Structure formats: C-alpha cells, structure tokens
Amino acid sequence: MSLNPITSLYYIAPCCLLFLTVPWYFVELPRLRAAAAGRPDVFVFGTNSLCAFALNLAVFLLVGKTSALTMNVAGVVKDWLLIAFSWTVIKDTVTPVNLVGYGIAFLGVAYYNHAKLQGLKAAKEAERNAASMATVEGDAEAGARLLPEKDGGEQKN
C-alpha cells in the first residue's frame, strides 16, 4: 500500500499520541505542574507542534521518494554534523572510541553510496543495451522490407 505523506500522518499520528501520552502523564506532567503553575505557554507549544508536524511530513516525504535506508544514512550525516559542531564550537571531548565509531559509520555511508551509484550505472547501461538491440532489430526489419523481391515482384520493361 502506498500512502502520501499527509495520509501517512493521518494514520500514524493517533497511535503516536496514544503511546506518548502514557509516559508524558507520569514523567513530564508532574514536572510541568511544579514549574509552570498550570499555565502552559501556548506560543511555545504551538510552534513546537508546527515544527514536529513539518519534521514528520518531511520524513514521510523523504522515505516515500527514496527509501528508509536513505533516511538512516541522512540521520548518520546529521549526527556527524552535530558532533562536529559540539567538538568545534562547544569544545566537547571526543574519545578515540568515538572517532573509530564515526570512521566506521563514514565507511558504511561511503560504501552505500558507491554501491548505489554502481547499481544506477548498471541499470542505465542495461537500458542502453536494450534500446540499441531494439534499434538493431528495427533496422534489420526495415532493411529486409527495402530489398526487392526476387520471385515475381520485378517489373518488366
């Protein structure tokens, strides 16, 4: 079954609401009541809701146009950017184990991109071969039609 992003959100959002309400009730609601005295900031909740909606829409659109694996690869790239930001700007420490893990993730992404590129090249080459074979077969049929008939098809002067 293929759904567009809005329809996917239509079916998935109620399930997410149900499963996220239970932990929210026990973990977040007591803290919210203690800190905000029962008056939530409507602007903050509204803008957060719009951002979450846009994010979910973008995720469903990306997965629909590409694949779930592409979404995972994009998540790895996003993690690299966050780590580079925290390492350079915030001056957070990065251990050798972290660097080895990031290196392995980088090699995995590079291999995935290489394999996908090779698959696309092979598919284009197969299309070209099929098109050239059809052209050769079409040329042979046209050439056979142009040859004069030897039996009784010749005209006499």
Image (spheres, helix red, strand yellow):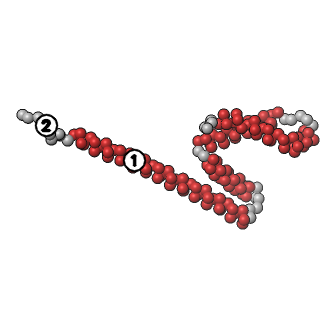
- Observer-nearest of 134 and 71: 134
Quadrant containing the N terminus is top right
| Percent position of residue 71, x then y | 64, 48
Can residue 154 be seen here? yes
- Observer-nearest of 34 and 83: 34
Q: Find disc 2 in the rendering and name its residue.
A: 152
Q: Amino acid at mark 2?
A: Gly
Can residue 81 be seen here? no
In the picture, measured across the screen, residue 69 lies left or right of residue 140, that is right
Quadrant position of residue 86: bottom right
- Observer-nearest of 110 and 13: 13
Label 1 vs label 2, nearer the camera: 2
What residue is at 62 percent from the left and 43 percent from the top?
63
- Give the answer, above or below, for where 137 lies relative to 10: below
- Give the answer, above or below, for where 156 lies relative to 139: above
What residue is at 63 percent from the left and 36 percent from the top?
3
Q: How packed is label 1: few (under 14 Cα within 10 Å), some, or many (20 or more)? A: few
What residue is at 54 percent from the left and 56 percent from the top?
114
What residue is at 24 percent from the left and 43 percent from the top?
143
Numbered disc 1: secondary structure: helix
- Observer-nearest of 91 and 113: 113
Q: Which mark is residue 38?
A: none
Of the image marks 1 and 2, the number of the one nearer the N terminus: 1
Numbered disc 2: secondary structure: loop
Q: How packed is label 2: few (under 14 Cα within 10 Å), some, or many (20 or more)? A: few
Q: Amino acid at mark 1?
A: Ala
| Percent position of residue 30, x then y | 91, 42
Quadrant position of residue 22: top right
| Percent position of residue 10, x then y | 70, 34
Q: CA distance from mark 1 to mark 2?
A: 38 Å
